[in-house]
Amino acid sequence: MSQANNKNTAMGTKGGRFSRRQFIGAAVGAVAVWGGYSVLFGGQFRADKADRNVDVLLIGGGIMSATLGVYLAELEPSWKFEVFERLDKVAEESSNGWNNAGTGHSALCELNYTPMDDKGKVQIAKAVEINENFQISRQFWSHQVRKGVLGNPREFINSTPHMNLVFGAENREFIRKRVEALKASPLFAGMEMSTDPAKIKEWIPIMMEGRKADEVVTATRSPLGTDVNLGAITRQFYKHLNERAGVKVTTGHEVRSITRNADGSWRVSAFDIKDKSRIQTVDARHIFIGAGGAALPLLQLSGIPEAKQYGGFPVGGEFLVTENPEIASRHLAKVYGLADTGSPPMSVPHLDTRVLDGKTVLLFGPFATWSSKYLKNGSYFDMVKATTPSNVIPQLQVGMHEFALVKYLAQQLELSKEEKMAALRRYMPEAKDQDWRLWQAGQRVQIIKNVPGQGGVLKLGTEVVVSEDRSVSALLGASPGGSTSPAIMLSLLEKVFPDRMKTAAWQSKIREIVPTYGKKLNENPQLLAAEWAATAEALQLAIAAPDLAGFTPTGAPAEQPGVVKKVPDIALQSQGST
Ligand SMILES: Cc1cc2nc3c(=O)[nH]c(=O)nc-3n(C[C@H](O)[C@H](O)[C@H](O)COP(=O)(O)OP(=O)(O)OC[C@H]3O[C@@H](n4cnc5c(N)ncnc54)[C@H](O)[C@@H]3O)c2cc1C
């Protein structure tokens, strides 16, 4: 991805803060524009006949569709597939390596997955769930390497210790409790903690140089972390799919019509982006909408009643990037922070080693950006077009209830490059302006769900939506993200094809792909050790997994968990961090 492509700038509130009245005014204005837009452009095209019939149509050329396609190609090799992607190439939106943080999410360093409850206990259930999901990713990608679908692992996954660096006595106490709590699970074995500045400097020199000697710092380090290039995986998956008989990947075509056929199948038309008179139409038994931020409007286009429960709120991310080899070569870690006492809990940045295009670079952020687009390469009308009579009230309700988030966003939008550099210097005191540039990453669309009895609720994770007859499925939301796509798509297969999933053929194939399928590794240290060894070998991970021989959980005995305070956290995606 070239810098020239990086032209999505934040729209918004420079020079003034959002007030509640301004926010409601903007929302009402958006609804009015929407009304006008629907009158002018409403109605859906329907082709008289299809050019092709397929078993499964995948809409969107990102990692989610790619992962589903690769699963299905193994499970049902005789099925016909088609992929429609609106851009000229696959993996150019959120899945592009430059458009996300590339954290292989395993909850080793994302502190929002281990919240403290009102009894002062650190809860680890969510962290265990995320980590279990990442073990599925390791197995899925290892299987694809062994099969030759994925090539050199160095191009898409690299051992990168996952760390925390926090400041102050209160945060040290939280980290200490977290490390203790995680000792209950073998998934987090090998995690070290240090309060010694000299030791921490050995781990992350550039984050300690220039720091006052008496500053209270605390760090953790897990050797199990990874940096993942989701774009490299996606491109290799589509190359593999495209080479198979019965699979067609059509780029440069945007899906604009999804209508039902009398036999229950779907007629889907995609318009050539450069020449709108050229239209490709397929009839499909199953559709998967893996269109990233644009999944919501496509789900609405299908007209399935399930779509009515959802609205969407777009948020972008921006990073400071350095490609200076002298700096990048001195930092090997993804180091996640925690908000300082007294500052908003959502200001949680991370300084990450990335391996992109064969080069090591550092990313710091994300800073939140705002645009009404649902995709980085989308349209400013996206949000207005997806606002419907059924989701307008829930969207407004979220605007009112999550006002802290709206305010936080407004504050983030006001930050100048100098202020962003100041935020970086909190983590890397000697960072110099000339080494760092700003980079606009991808757009995410947060789910707003109309929950009976509660109204509009902002959901920060992902949601697999499946129609009642299971012929349409979609992935809404974006967290924890593409690095757990193999587990997310496995859960989608269970929902869309429950009967096939029970067959001996699918069961044995799934276990070939994900050998520990159906087992909790958290409860089985021997199996976990075997899985780590096998996947570390296949993925050629440079840092060995810790030895689990004789592992005995030492965490606090399970007790009734307390209440966890809700934390608005758009930078980190609270319940699903990225
Ligand atoms: C700032 C940021 C940081 C992130 N950090 C991480 C991280 O550290 N770790 C992690 O695991 N995840 C991270 N994520 C999330 C991760 O990037 C996403 O979960 C993942 O890329 C989503 O993949 P996808 O296939 O659903 O969507 P995308 O990659 O966005 O792909 C959707 C595709 O659909 C196409 N499309 C849309 N509409 C149409 C249409 N009408 N017709 C045809 N094609 C269409 C688009 O052009 C696009 O190519 C991050 C995301 C962001 C934005």
Image (spheres, grey):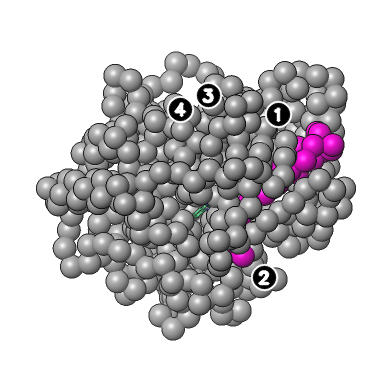
Residue 13, horizontal then vertical, whole percent = 22, 62
Return the residue found at the far bottom: 434
Q: Is mark 1 within 8 Å of ligand 1?
A: no
| Mark nearer the N terminus (2 vs 4) | 4
Does the magenta portion include 173? no
Q: Which residue is mark 3?
A: 556
Q: Position of residue 390 (x, y in %)?
A: 32, 32
Marked residue nearer the N-terminal end (4 or 3): 4
Which mark sits nearer the N-terminus, 1 or 4? 4
Query: What is the C-alpha distance between the residues marked 4 and 3?
Result: 41 Å
Residue type at mark 3 is Ala
Query: Is tag 3's residue or tag 1's residue first in the polypeptide sequence?
Result: 1
Q: Is residue 87 magenta?
A: yes
User: In 3D space, how far apart are the residues under numbered discs 1 and 4 (Cα atoms)?
Assistant: 34 Å
Q: Amino acid at mark 1?
A: Leu
Secondary element under disc 2, as helix, strand or loop, is: loop
Q: Is residue 363 above or below residue 240?
A: below
**Residue corresponding to mark 2:** 357
- Region rendered in magenta: 68-88
Residue at image position (64%, 63%) is 89
- Percent position (x, y) of residue 422? 34, 70
> Which tag is nearer the camera, tag 3 or tag 2?
2
The kind of residue on which mark 4 rests is Glu
User: Is residue 453 rendered to the left or right of residue 537?
Assistant: left
